[in-house]
Amino acid sequence: MVDTVEFNVLEHELVPEHYLVTKEEADKVLKSMKITMDQLPKIRRSDSCIRVLENIYGPIEEGRIVKIVRRSATAETFVAYRLVIRG
Amino acid sequence: MMRGVSKRIGSVRFACLSPDEIRRMSATKIITADTYDDDGFPIDMGLMDPHLGVIEPGLRCKTCGHKVDECPGHFGHIDLAMPVIHVGFVKEIKKLLQSTCRSCGRLLLTEEQAKEYKEAMEMVEEMGGDTMDVRLVSKETAKDAASRPICPHCGAEQLKITLDKPTTFREDGHKLTPKEVRERLERIPDEDLVPLGIDPKACRPEWMVLTALPVPPVTVRPSITLESGDRSEDDLTHKLVDVLRINQRLRENRDAGAPQLIVEDLWELLQYHVTTYFDNQTSGIPPARHRSGRPLKTLVQRLKGKEGRFRSNLSGKRVNFSARTVISPDPGLSINEVGVPYEAARELTLPVYATKSNIGILKGMVKRGPNPVGDKYLPGVNYVIRPDGRRIRVTEKNAESVAETVEIGFIVERHLMDNDIVLFNRQPSLHRMSMMAHSVRVMPWKTFRLNLCVCPPYNADFDGDEMNLHVLQSDEARAEALILMKVQEHILSPRFGGPVIGAIHDHITGCFLLTHRDSKFTRGETLFMLSRVVHRELPPPVEIDGVKYWTGKQLFSLVLPDDFRITFRASICRKCPECQKEKCDLDAYVRIRKGDLLYGTIDEKAIGAFKGKIVDKLARDYGSETAKNVIDNLTRLAIGAIMVRGFTTGIDDEDIPEEARRQIEDVLQDAAKKVDDLVAAYREGILEQLPGRSLEETLEVEVMKVLGRARDEAGQIAGRHLGLENSAVIMARSGARGSMLNLSQMAGCIGQQAVRGERLSRGYWNRTLPHFRKGDLGAQARGFVTNSYKSGLTPTEFFFHSMGGREGLVDTAVRTSRSGYMQRRLINALEDLKLKQDGTVRNTADMVVQFKYGEDGVDPCRSVQGDAVDVDDLLVEVLGDEAELLAKIEEKKLAGYATIEKDLMETEDEEEFEEPEFEGGGEE
C-alpha cells in the first residue's frame, strides 16, 4: 500500500468530484432527506479519494460525510452523499 | 381461516446448541444401531424409536400422542464416547485457537487493545454496517491477536496452530485431539469472545466440539417400504447407524483399556462418520457411499445447491391452481386474451364468496356439478367450503343436495370462465414481460392459444413451446394484476423505452401488401377483410370503369384514431441522400394526417414489435387501451389482406436468369484470380505490407477484402433480378422475416466461411482437407464457398460450411449458459431494491442505494428511447407541419436500443448474421 499520495486521483477524468461536507451542512442534508447517518452509502477511509481530501482538510474521522458530484448519463450531473467509515 | 396478523415476528436469532440443550430437547437417548426387530417393530432407543415421531398412518407418537400429520416429530440424541469436531465450525475453531493463549485461554491482546477493537465494532454497527462489516472487524481482531507470540496476560509462549484439513488441528506439528481442543476452548472467558464477534450467550466456543449429537426426528428421514416388503432406510439413517456402531466400539475399547493406538483409530473413524453425516462433500476425505456406490446425501447436501431445500423448496415452490400445456397461435384473440382448453378450465378453480347478490348464480353453478354437460361451456364447481372451513367435494351425485346447503358466507370454488384474470408465463422468465396477466377465453382443443403479437415479449414460437398459467385466488391479486400486469400495460418496454408488442411476420407482410403503392380491393374483398375488424365508417370508394374499389391505404386508415398524425420513413426506404418525400418511387415516405394514411407503405418500421413507430406513438399518446384496440384490429386486417392477396414463397423465389448466373460466376472467378495473384505476390515477397501487420496477416486481410467484395457483388447481381414483386424480397425488405443477405446467400454466393474471424486453416498438415495441396492459400482451399444454397454445395464446401456453423452453435450455447449465470447473480444482488415514495432506491434494511431512481427519476417505460421528453414530438404537436420544416424534423432519431443494436450488427459484421430474436426453441 502506498502511504504517500503521489498521484491525485481526483484529477483523473473518470473519478467524480469529492467534497467534504461540514458537520452542520451534513445535518441539514440528512434532515432534508429524512434519513439517519447509517442509511447513507459508505466510503472507506482508505479510499484514495478520502486520502486526497485528507491532504487538504487534515484527518477525516469516521462519521463524516462526503458529497460526490458525478456525471450521469441520464441526469447530466448528480449529487450523492457517502458516509466515511473505518477501513 | 385466520385473517390478519395475530403475532408479528420481531427478529430471528441463530445460535449454537449446547450439549446440555441437545440432551434437554431430546425425546430419547439412542444407543443401539439396530432399527427394527424381527417382527418389524421399531426397537426402543434405536434410530426408529417411536418417541421420535410417527411416519406410519394410524400409529400414535409416544412423545406427544398425535397422529401422522399432527405430530411434528421429536429430536433424540446420541452421547458420543469421545468429543468430535463439528466440520461446520472448523474455521471458527481455528480462529479461536490461534487468537487465544494456550495456557490461560485469554485473548492475546491487552485490555486496551481489546477495548479498541470492541469500540471499532460498535462504531461499525452504529454506522449501519451489516454483518459482513462486523465480521470484517472481528477477523482483523483475530489476525492481530494471532500474530502475538507471547500472551500479555500470563506471559506464556504461543506455538503455531495449523489446521490439517478437514478436521485435524496441529500445534507445532503435534496433533491436538478434539478433547484438548475442547479444553482450550472452555478456558476462553466470555468477555474475550465479544471482540472476536461471538456472543457468548448464543454460542460458547466449546459447543463447537460435539459431545452429544442430535438425532433428527423420523419425519425428517422417513424409511420407505418397497413393494417386496423390504424396508429401505433414508441416507441420514444409514449415516447415523455408522456413527452409533463406531461410537459403541469406541466406548467398549476405551472402557476395556485397549491400546492407545486402537482407541485413536476408532476416534478418528468416529470423527469421519460425524463429519460425513454433516457434509458428505468435505474436501480432503472420501465421501461415504451407499452399498451401490452412490454417495450418500447428508445434511449439507439436502440444503445446498439448485436441488437443495433453499433454492428448490423455499425460494421456489410447486403451486396449485396452475396449468401447463403447448401453445398455439390464434389471430382472432385480443392481445389481452389467452385461450384455455375446456379440460384445463374444469380443473382450475377460483374461490367465490357467496353473498346476497350472487348466491342464486352460485347455487346454479354448484347444481351443475364438476362436469356440466351441454354444447356451451358453463362453469361448474369442484369444491364448496363451508364457513367452518370444511371442504366438500362436489360430485355429480351430490351436486343437487350440496347446492341446497349453500348459504351466504360459503366459499364456492367455481371453474374458470371467460374474462377471468390469469397470469401467463413462459420460461426463462428473463424480464417482467415474461409473466403477464391475460383474460381467459375458454375454448375447445387442448392447447393454450395466444395472439401472435405477444410472442416477442415471451420470446415464444409454436414449435412445441409450452407455457404456464396461474389462476389468481384473491381479489387483491386480481386487482393488482389487472392494473399492473395486463398485456396492454406492457406494450412499451422498460428496456429501451419502445414497444415490445407489435406485428410480426405475416402481419407485416399483410400490411405491406395492403398499403404498398396503390393497391385496390373490390367490395367483396374489402368486406371480407373488415369482417373481423372494429372500425370507423367506410370512406367513399374510388370508381374505376364502373367498379367500386377501396384503396389499401383507405382501409388501413380505418383502424387508426381519427386525429392520428405521424411522419417517418418506412423500412423499405433506401436512404437516398436527397429524400423525394411524397414523390418517393418506393412509396417509403409515410405520412399520416387526421388518421388518414396519405402516403407510404406500412411495414416493420410502422407496426413491428421493437421498431413500430405507430404502435409506439399510440401507446404513448393515446393510452394502452387504444393501442391494444389498434393492434388487435390492425393484425386482423393484415391477416385479411394477406389472405385476399395470397402469399407464398418457395425455392423459385431465388431463381435468377442464366445471364445473371454467368455474371456471378465471372465475378467469383475474377475474385479467385485476384486471390491467386495476391498469393503469388506474397510468395515472391512483393506484397506490400500493411502497417502494424505481418506479411501473412496482410495477405489474409487482402484476401478477405477481395472475397468479401466478391460476395457482395454476387449478392447485388442477384438482387437486381429480385424485385419487390418477389415474395421473399417483400419479406426481407418489409422486415417481416429474413434479410437481403439471406437471399443473396440463397441466390448468389454463400461466401467465406470463418472460424474466430479468420479463414479456415486447421485440419491437416498445412491444409484444411486432403483434397488440396499443402500450403494452398487460394480461395477454395481456405473455405470460400462459391456456390449458393440453391445451387448446392460441393462436398468440401459443405464441410467448410459445417465448420463455420459449428462455431455459431458453440457460441450460442456458451453465451446462454454464461448470461444465465450472470443474470442469477445480478438478480440475487438487486432483488430487495425498492423505489420508495421519496424517489430514493432503498434495500430492505432501508439503506439508501441511489438518491434518485435512475439519477433522473424517470420511468424508462415512459421514456422516449431513454429520454425523459421528446422535444421534437412536442414541437410537432404544437406547431404542426410547420415545425417539421423549421426544425428539420423529418424523422426522429432511429428507434430504440433493439434497432440500433441490430443496425450495428447488420453493417459491421455482415458475416453469417443470424437474427437472434425469434430463433426457434424446438430445434436448439
Image: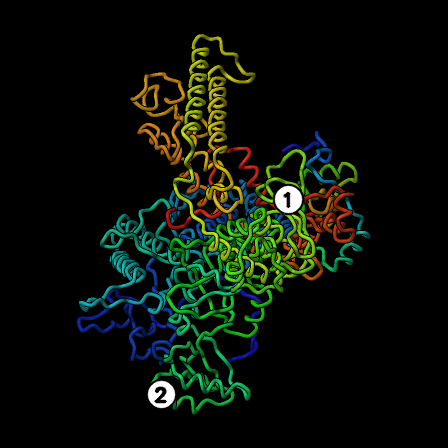
Amino acid type at image mark 1: Tyr
Q: Position of residue B316 (x, y in %)?
A: 45, 61
Label 2 sits on a secondary structure element that is loop
Q: Chain of mark 2?
A: B
B879 with respect to B780 (left or right)? right
- Which residue is the site of mark 2? B398
Q: Position of residue B34 (x, y in %)?
A: 24, 66
Q: Nearer the viewer, mark 1 or mark 2?
A: 1
A27 with respect to B142 (left or right)? right
Q: Chain of mark 1?
A: B
* Residue B122 in view in this figure: no
Q: Most extreme residue toward the right, as rendered?
A: A24
* In front of the other: B908 or B842: B908
Q: CA–CA distance between discs 1 and 2?
A: 68 Å
* In front of the other: B699 or A3: B699
- Which residue is the site of mark 1? B589
* In front of the other: B490 or B834: B490
Residue located 38% across and 44% down the image: B175
Q: Position of residue B12 (x, y in %)?
A: 54, 65
